[in-house]
Image: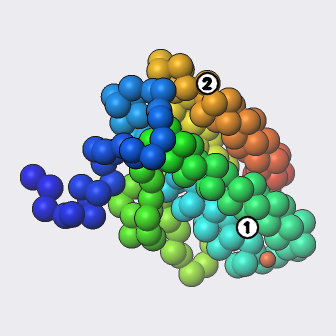
Amino acid sequence: MTTSTQKTALKPVTRSTQAEFDLSTDAVAQITDALRPLLADVFSLYLKTKNFHWHMTGRHFRDYHLLLDEHADQLFAMTDDIAERARKIGGFTLRSISDISQHQRLRDNNAVEVTPGQMMQELLDDNLQLTRFLRAAHGICDRHGDVATASLIENWIDQTERRAWFLSEIVGDIQ
Ligand SMILES: [Fe+2]
């Protein structure tokens, strides 16, 4: 039983009376249920990428520090589009940091000491996992004919694969 009014409020139980929506209520529920954890994952990966950008050490500091800033910028740019897709189709999205932590699937890393190699490996793993989540969300959009969200997701998969490519080249060089 749901005791939290906050949790209840996250469900797309009502739709705006201010606009017309083409997708069915069921489609909106399924797509927003896919977008919500996706947004939480992207926010968490954004912050982890910034964490490693800030705490990078070693002889490749400048290269890795700058690369991770580029990656963080890409991830942050995704967040507004993910949230607004949910709203555009009549659903709801995240409202707070606690909401992110409730829905994220990628794990945080609060360790004090992480080597550059560990950082790159973990970001590689997370980006590969994010690609899988994106593909799954794409499949749900496809099933409901939400081509606009699917189209955005295709670009995000390409960006995520690019990040994974760069990270994998670095990981291969370090180990
Ligand atoms: Fe910075």
* Residue 135 lies in quadrant: top right
Q: x, y (%) of residue 128?
A: 62, 41
* Residue 114 lies in quadrant: bottom right
Q: Is residue 170 left or right of residue 81?
A: right
User: Mark 1 Cα within 10 Å, few/some/many (few <14, many 20+)?
Assistant: many
Q: In this view, does 44 lie to the left or right of 172?
A: left
Q: Is residue 80 left or right of residue 3?
A: right
In the image, the residue with mark 2 has its CB under 8 Å from the nearest atom of ligand 1: no
Q: In this view, does 30 lie above or below 72?
A: above
Q: x, y (%) of residue 152?
A: 67, 36
Q: Is mark 1 on a helix, strand or loop?
A: helix
Task: Identify which amino acid the numbered label 2 is placed on.
Answer: Val
First of labels 2, 1 by sequence position: 1
Q: In which quarter of the image is ligand 1?
A: bottom right
In the picture, the disc for residue 116 is: 1
Colour scheme in the image?
rainbow
In the picture, the disc for residue 81 is: none
Q: x, y (%) of residue 100?
A: 44, 62
Cα distance between the residues tagged 2 and 1: 39 Å
Q: Pick the residue in front: 122 or 3.
A: 3
Q: Is residue 43 left or right of residue 25?
A: right
Disc 2 target residue: 147
Label 2 vs label 1, nearer the camera:
2
Task: Identify which amino acid the numbered label 1 is placed on.
Answer: Pro
User: Going 67% across and 64% down the picture, which residue do you hit?
Assistant: 49
Residue 132 appearing in the image: no
Residue 13 appearing in the image: yes
Q: Is mark 2 on a helix, strand or loop?
A: helix
Residue positioned most to the front = 18
User: Going 73% across and 36% down the picture, which residue do you hit?
Assistant: 155
Q: x, y (%) of residue 125?
A: 61, 48
